[in-house]
């Protein structure tokens, strides 16, 4: 959305209170965006954010001096994302997305 | 965190029983998940449920008591043992009913037929790693109300009696509850 539009409007209509209004609007906007992102990016299997290493890899990397373990993210055709480690364990038992029950097929992998 | 550290110390010192050949060196995935899930379960406990941990340091084993406030089993108190295996959350917890009762989905041996506790399932009702301990509690609690199922019974006799004569079914339920209290 464009902050400038509101900015201009405020200025034309109401000179005295413009700074108050602008401040409130911007703050609200930022908070809403942030919480949405977090909810979507949590791996529903291990409940760690997909951009971080999964629960399994977190426990192991501390012992490993290599520090090279790549815990990648996998997206299904259904657009749900999980850690590749977590999902590969589950599809051995049931080849469906645990969130939407669609047959699991990988759309892409990466970070 | 204190609870967890104590648990680890204990696992180091107690000699293994042969089944687990090597001592547990680090916190299992199950225990990491349980730290969050046990708290979440306690915070979301239905009014009709209570949980009891025999050993507060062992999070993977507890007793759930359901005291239904509606339906055929009102006035009864039903205990379930819940055991969370090392394979959690890829595998569902193992549940046994410890109270003898007359119920189409629980047999006299205490086996419980609840779809979300099924490891292999072709539909969306079976186990999935997205399910949590609080969902298991909710499911067991609902066996006395919403999830009560006469269509696909484990105790066939109970389901048949219900279809034949609901008054007799209710009487038999009561009879088991009185027996259980003695
Ligand atoms: Zn994960
Ligand atoms: Zn991983
Ligand atoms: Zn999906």
Image (spheres, coloured by chain):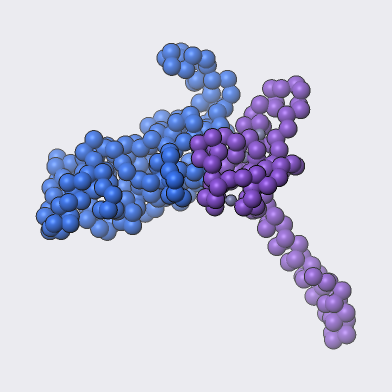
Chain colours: A purple, B blue
Residue B136 at least partly seen: no
Tell me residue B35's x, y (percent).
53, 37
Q: Nearer the viewer, residue A71 or B22?
A: A71
Q: Nearer the viewer, residue A46 or B49?
A: A46
Specify whether B44 is left or right of B99: right
Tell me residue A73's x, y (percent).
69, 41
Residue A17 at least partly seen: yes
Tell me residue B48's x, y (percent).
34, 52
Residue at 68% of width from left, 57% of height from top? Answer: A35
Tell me residue A39's x, y (percent).
64, 53
Q: Nearer the viewer, residue A37 or A95?
A: A95
Residue at 44% of width from left, 49% of height from top? Answer: B123
From this view, report whether residue B103 is shown above or below residue B3: below
Quadrant of ligand 1 in image: top right
Residue at 70% of width from left, 27% of height from top? Answer: A61
Q: Quadrant of residue B93?
A: top left
Quadrant of the rendering where the C terminus of chain B is positioned: top left
Specify whether A69 is left or right of B85: right
Numbered marks: total: 0
Residue positioned most to the bottom: A13
Residue at 63% of width from left, 35% of height from top? Answer: A85
Quadrant of the rendering where the N terminus of chain B is positioned: top right
From this view, report whether residue B28 is shown above or below residue A106: above
């Amino acid at each position: 959305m464009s902050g400038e539009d509101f900015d201009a409007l405020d200025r034309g209509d109401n000179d005295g209170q413009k700074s108050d209004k602008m401040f409130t609007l911007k703050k609200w906007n930022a908070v809403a965006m942030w919480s949405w992102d977090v909810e979507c990016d949590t791996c529903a299997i291990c409940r760690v954010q997909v951009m971080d290493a999964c629960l399994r890899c977190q426990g192991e990397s501390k012992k490993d001096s290599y520090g090279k373990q790549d815990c990648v993210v996998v997206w299904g055709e259904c657009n749900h994302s999980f850690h590749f480690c977590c999902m590969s364990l589950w599809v051995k038992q049931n080849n469906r997305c645990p969130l939407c029950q669609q047959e699991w097929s990988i759309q892409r992998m990466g970070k | 965190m204190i609870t967890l550290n104590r648990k680890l110390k204990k696992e180091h010192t107690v000699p293994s029983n042969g089944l687990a050949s090597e001592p547990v060196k680090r916190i299992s995935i199950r225990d990491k998940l349980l730290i969050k899930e046990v708290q979440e379960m306690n915070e979301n406990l239905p009014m009709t449920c209570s949980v009891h941990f025999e050993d507060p340091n062992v999070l993977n084993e507890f007793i759930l008591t359901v005291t239904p406030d509606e339906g055929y089993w009102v006035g009864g108190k039903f205990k379930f043992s819940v055991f969370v295996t090392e394979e959690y959350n890829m595998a569902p917890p193992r549940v046994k009913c410890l109270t003898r009762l007359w119920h189409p989905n629980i047999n006299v041996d205490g086996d419980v037929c609840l779809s979300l506790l099924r490891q292999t399932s072709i539909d969306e009702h079976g186990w999935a790693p997205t399910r949590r301990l609080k969902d298991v509690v909710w499911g067991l609690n609902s066996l006395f109300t919403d999830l009560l199922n006469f269509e696909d019974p484990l105790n066939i006799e109970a389901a048949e009696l219900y279809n034949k004569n609901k008054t007799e079914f209710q009487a038999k339920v009561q009879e088991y509850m009185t027996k259980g209290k003695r």
